[in-house]
Amino acid sequence: MTIFGIPTQALFGQLLIGLINGAFYAMLSLGLAVIFGLLNIINFTHGAQYMLGAFCAWFLLQYAGVGYWWSLLLAPLVVGVVGILIERTMLARLYKLDHLYGLLLTFGLALILQGIFTNYFGSSGQPYQLPQEFSGAFNLGFMFLPKYRAWVIVASLVVCLGTWYVIERTKLGSYLRAATENPALVQAFGINVPRMITATYGFGVGLAALAGVMAAPIYQVNPQMGANIIIVVFAVVVIGGMGSILGSIITGFGLGLIEGLTKVFYPEASNTVIFIIMAIVLLIKPAGLFGRAR
Amino acid sequence: MTSATVTESTARGSSMDRGTAIALVVMVLAFAVAPLAFYPVFLMNVLCMALFACAFNLLIGFGGLLSFGHAMFLGMAGYVCAHAAKVWGFPPAAAIALGTATAAGLGIVAGLLAIRRQGIYFAMITLALAQMVYFFCLQAPFTHGEDGIQSVPRGKLFGFLDLNNVWVLYYVVLAIFVAAFLLIYRTVHSPFGQVLKAIRENEARAISLGYDADRYKLLAFVLSATLAGLAGATKAIVFQLASLTDVHWSMSGEVVLMTLLGGMGTIFGPVIGALIIVGLQNYLAPLGQWVTVITGVIFVVCVLAFRRGIVGELTEWWKRRHPRERPASS
């Protein structure tokens, strides 16, 4: 069976890969958007923290024999705490300055983390053993869907929609949104805004680490894995605009799919298609698809 | 900034103040005799990177625009220059000119897209565009992928200056650097440069005074891209090589670091920054990946403790010690 001269097997296979990539784009751009909303900082370390999450899971398995499920909980906690330390000791000093300094600082931190890990692990990847329960695949009739990939898609959707729910529908989320609009006023109402900022950064970073753990069995655990993905995620963020949580989820998954389709129909452009879309979006709607002009 | 101060500083800008003139002469003399003590190829690398950083500084220091994708101009100009010299047999001057022109063209396209957003978005957009150029260079056949364009002929400049002689080459590179440096100095102190500073300080006000902010920003972007391209094309001739290193995002980060370390918005800062960073990379090369870590640490320290950069901090210290002699503009 073929569609447009492409065997369906290949088409659906690439779409699946696209969807998986989209799941990671969505989780990472979500974290970036949440952090940006409150801290006004673009967290360049996000890619390195994603890598840190994957390495954390690898360490836990390799040296402590802690399996995938516990890593899913522990790695985001560990990386989140590291993130909170970074926020308290460094980022907190920059809030009154031009936002660009936050970008420069987090870029420096990303270099440090990547450099250290490249030093000890080289640029080749460490394989992460797939958990037993995920070996095998579902037969969907038109294609085979490996169980782990199905899990990644479902889990990331749950995480993304859960985050959306907390931010848009709960009281805590309403504080967060209010503090994004006007931190001084929210503080005047007796809410501890600095602590909220710290917690938000920890949460966003934890989200990146969670994505890293989920990525570990699919991609190899590699010191450069974050650097490669973060620039694409930046483009995703520019396309979606950082104004809306749901927007960054949709943009993430959508662009992953488009990337997958491009791999089928015009492989040469698959690396660049997201950047080309970014250029087109900038020409038509500079604030981004879901963004508000500011 | 009001229009009155713009015209006032324009009148003053036509002549260089004494301190700057002395510093400029000292810098040129130092570079002129430096090959006696240091390896000329190392110094030419410093000069190319210093020119690159000065071009970058024109944008961030005087226009307030942080580009995180300047490597695309450096690398692309290098590739085109190398290809023209090697495959098409262009003489060096024409190859460098073609490389520089390519960077200018790329600057127009990238600039038109990037200036549609400001601040952090501007940085992310330039980074993404540069990554696109990187993938283009990785895949396009003429760049030879991972190998790069190797053994580019240096040739004879204007038909009689043999660039294969390292001394001739060195002074040609120095001349290119000084000419570009003076051009940047002149630009910063021209009415154009003053308007650019006004836009940086308060864009809305500059627009209300009748300046077309987008046009000024685009012009600054293209000028910066062109000079970055000149640095890249010259570098390709010096090293006889154009490779992916020069289009990679880490190169974009490096030029940010050089400028930050030397002092953003200072005339000489980027040169000092380039000297230190290239020196560091050169002498610490055996440490391998630790150089990346050190680079990162310098970034963090600069941002946390040292935001004016070396030249900026020195100027500030001098001003505090000599409050009366304080020059009207930095």
Image (spheres, coloured by chain):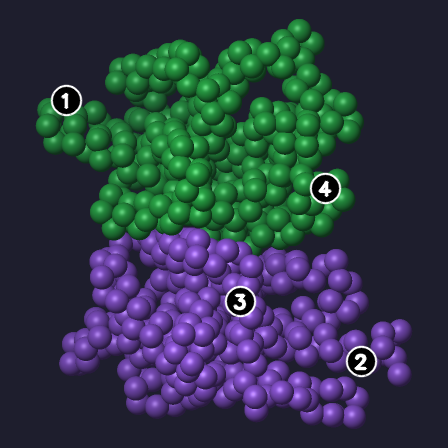
Chain colours: A purple, B green
Relative to B231, is A38 on the left or the right?
Answer: left
Secondary structure beneath label 2 = helix
Label 2 Cα crowd, 10 Å radius (few <14 / some 14-19 / many 20+): some
Mark 3 to mark 4: distance in Å? 29 Å
Secondary structure beneath label 1 = loop
- Three-letter amino acid code of the residue under disc 1: Glu
Mark 3 to mark 1: distance in Å? 61 Å
Most foreground residue, B202 or A96: A96
Label 1 Cα crowd, 10 Å radius (few <14 / some 14-19 / many 20+): few
Residue A87 image position (x, y, % from top left): 27, 65
Q: Which mark is residue B325?
A: 1
Q: Nearer the viewer, mark 3 or mark 1?
A: 3
Q: Which mark is residue B144?
A: 4
Most foreground residue, A4 or B148: B148
Instruction: Give the residue drawn at x 38%, y 67%.
Output: A36
**Protein chain holding label 4:** B
Judge whether A153 appears above or below B65 on screen: below
Q: Which mark is residue A9?
A: 2
Mark 2 to mark 1: distance in Å? 77 Å
**Protein chain holding label 3:** A
Q: Which mark is first along the chain, 4 or 1?
A: 4
Q: Nearer the viewer, mark 2 or mark 1?
A: 2
Contact, mark 3 vs mark 1 (Cβ under 8 Å) = no
Contact, mark 2 vs mark 1 (Cβ under 8 Å) = no
Q: Which residue is mark 3?
A: A126
Judge whether B212 appears above or below B163 on screen: below
- Three-letter amino acid code of the residue under disc 2: Gln
Q: Same chain for the residues at labels 3 and 2, yes or no?
A: yes
**Protein chain holding label 1:** B
- Three-letter amino acid code of the residue under disc 4: His
Q: Nearer the viewer, mark 3 or mark 2?
A: 3
Residue B129 image position (x, y, % from top left): 58, 52
